[in-house]
Image (cartoon, rainbow, N blue to C red):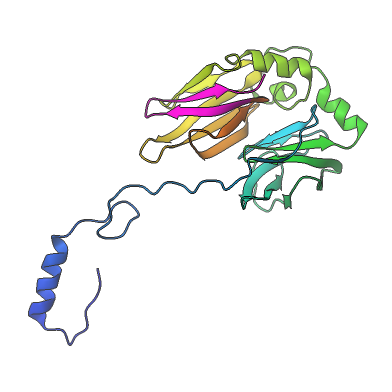
Amino acid sequence: MRRYGASTATAAALTLLALAGCGTSPGPGGEGGGTGKPTPAARDKGPACVGEDPGATVHVLRGGGFKLPGGGGVQYADATADGTRRTATLRDGATYASGQEEWKVAPGAEVTVSGHAYAVRQVCAHRVVLEPESAEDRAALAAEPASLEPRQGAADDALCFTTGPAVRKAAAQGFPTKGATLALLANGGVQRFPTGLSVTVAYVHPDTGTAGLDANCATVPVAGYEDVRAGDTVEFAGVEFEVATLTDKAVRLTRTSD
C-alpha cells in the first residue's frame, strides 16, 4: 500500500484507503490486480545436449552427486544454455557442503577431483558425462561387486556409483521396457528399484505443468530435477526417460533408452 504525504487531505486519504480495501488481493508472490496464478518456470533454451557419450562413462545427474575413486565426488550443481551453447557448473564433493570448489565446464574441459583427472565428454540439461583419464580409475569404476543385492546405506556404493555393465544391466531391468511408462505417484512415497535406487516425486504443480523429482542411492542425493515438464528428459541409474504427463496424482515417464 502506498503512503501519502501529509499535505493530502484526510478525507481523500480515507477514501483511497477504503477503495484499496475493496480491491483484488494480490496472488502469491504477485502484484495487486494480478490473476493470482503461479508464474511458470522459464524453459531451458537448449540445446538439450552438447558433445557425445563414448560409453563406459560416469553420468552425473542434474542436481545430484556421484562418488568417485579415491574418496572424492562431484555434483552437477547448475546449468546454462543460450540456444546454441550449453555449460554446466560442477561442484567438488558427492554431497553439498559450504566452501566447495566449483567449475564451469563444457565438452572438452578437464576437471581434477581428489587428484584424479576426468574429461568432460558431454553436457546435457539432465546430466554431465565424465570419462576417467587413467586406466586405474576406469578399472575401479567398472569393477563388479560381490553381490547385486542392495543392503542400504554406504554399503551400496559399488551398486550406485559404477560403470560396470552387470550392475547397469540389473538396474535397467528394474524399469519398464523401452517405450513403456513408469508412473511415479505424487503422494510423497518413496519408490524403490534394484541396485539401491529410490525415487520420490518432490512436488507437482499442475497449474504450471511442472514437477520435481528426487533420487537417492547409498544415502547420496544422485538427482534433483527441478521444474521438469512434459517433453523433458530425466535419467535414473543410467536409463533415460521422457516426461510424458504429470497430474496431482502422478508423474508418468516414458522410457526412451535401451
Query: Where does residue 162 sit, x and y in percent of width and height?
Result: 76, 25
- Residue depicted at x 80% and y 27%: 56
Q: Is residue 188 visible?
A: yes
Viewer-side residue, 177 vs 186: 177
Q: Magenta span has 248?
A: yes
Query: Where does residue 104 sit, x and y in percent of width and height?
Result: 72, 52
**In the displayed structure image, the side of residue 201 where residue 88 appears, left or right:** right
Residue 115 sits in quarter: top right
- Residue depicted at x 38% and y 25%: 249
Outermost residue to the bottom: 7
**Residue range corresponding to the magenta coloring:** 240-258
Q: How many marks?
A: 0
Residue 253 sits above or below residue 41 on the image: above
- Residue depicted at x 36% and y 47%: 38
Query: Where does residue 74 sit, x and y in percent of width and height?
Result: 72, 41
**In the displayed structure image, the side of residue 228 where residue 138 appears, left or right:** right
Main structural element of the magenta stretch: helix, strand or loop? strand
Quarter of the image that includes the N terminus:
bottom left
- Residue depicted at x 10% and y 78%: 12
**In the displayed structure image, the side of residue 158 where residue 173 appears, left or right:** left
Residue 186 sits above or below residue 148 on the image: below
Q: Magenta span has 168?
A: no
Viewer-side residue, 55 vs 66: 55
Outermost residue to the right: 135
Quarter of the image that includes the C terminus:
top right
**In the displayed structure image, the side of residue 162 where residue 95 appears, left or right:** left
Residue 31 sits in quarter: bottom left
Residue 159 sits in quarter: top right
